[in-house]
Image: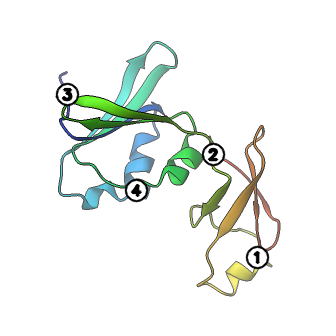
Amino acid sequence: MTIDSIKNGIVLDHIKAGKSMEIYRILDLSKLDCSVAIIKNAVSKKAGHKDIIKIDSLIDINLDVLGYIDPGITVNVVKDGEIVEKRHLSLPEEVTDVLKCTNPRCITSVEQELPHIFHLTDREKGIYRCVYCEHRVKAEA
């Protein structure tokens, strides 16, 4: 199988196998007017298998969302066919409107216009807490 390289755009590499469709949905990549290639279960020396997403346009991507979904992702920015920037992600300190608080007593269950904000309280275990009620949530990754 051959997937062409891109001239200008973004390559999301080292995605955990099977997570690319979730990222495609959460980042609303279907709304883009450019080519988007999803490569699932590519062979990886480090992980065994990985997913890759190639976006044939330089767009703004919410790196906090990506870092929360899979902190092992590498974001490569490509210009004129060359990688000009490579970012390694980690769990973000704060995520807004990525998670929904499941505590029925949380103010966000009543005041629906409030943003759902979570702060990272334990990086090693990937634990986030709601800023309103302190409800704990474990990161997906």
Instruction: Between residue 94 and residue 17, name the one nearer to us.
Output: 94
Could you give the CA–CA distance between mark 1 and mark 3, rounded to whole angstroms? 47 Å
Instruction: Between residue 122 and residue 28, name the one nearer to us.
Output: 122
Q: Secondary structure at mark 3?
A: loop
Instruction: Please identify the quadrant where the C terminus is shown.
Output: top right
Q: Nearer the N terminus, badge 3 or badge 2?
A: 3
- Amino acid type at circle 1 is Pro
Q: Look at the picture and state if 96 lies above or below 18.
A: below
Q: Are marks 1 and 3 in contact (CB under 8 Å)?
A: no
Q: Secondary structure at mark 2?
A: loop
Could you give the CA–CA distance between mark 1 and mark 4, rounded to whole angstroms? 27 Å
Could you give the CA–CA distance between mark 4 and mark 2, rounded to whole angstroms? 16 Å
Q: Nearer the N terminus, badge 4 or badge 3?
A: 3
Q: Which residue is mark 1?
A: 104
Rendered residue at 44%/27% (across/down): 50
Q: Are marks 4 and 2 in contact (CB under 8 Å)?
A: no
Q: Which residue is mark 3?
A: 3
Q: Nearer the N terminus, badge 1 or badge 3?
A: 3
Q: Which residue is mark 4?
A: 27
Q: Which residue is mark 2?
A: 140
Q: Look at the picture and state if 43 lies above or below 96.
A: above
Q: Nearer the N terminus, badge 2 or badge 1?
A: 1
Q: Secondary structure at mark 4?
A: loop
Q: Nearer the viewer, mark 1 or mark 4?
A: 4
Q: Nearer the N terminus, badge 1 or badge 4?
A: 4
Of all residues shown, which one is farthest toward the top? 45
Q: Nearer the viewer, mark 1 or mark 3?
A: 3
- Amino acid type at circle 4 is Leu
Res. 85 mark: none
Task: Find residue 29 and report its horizontal and vertical position in percent.
Answer: 31, 55
Instruction: Please identify the quadrant where the N terminus is shown.
Output: top left
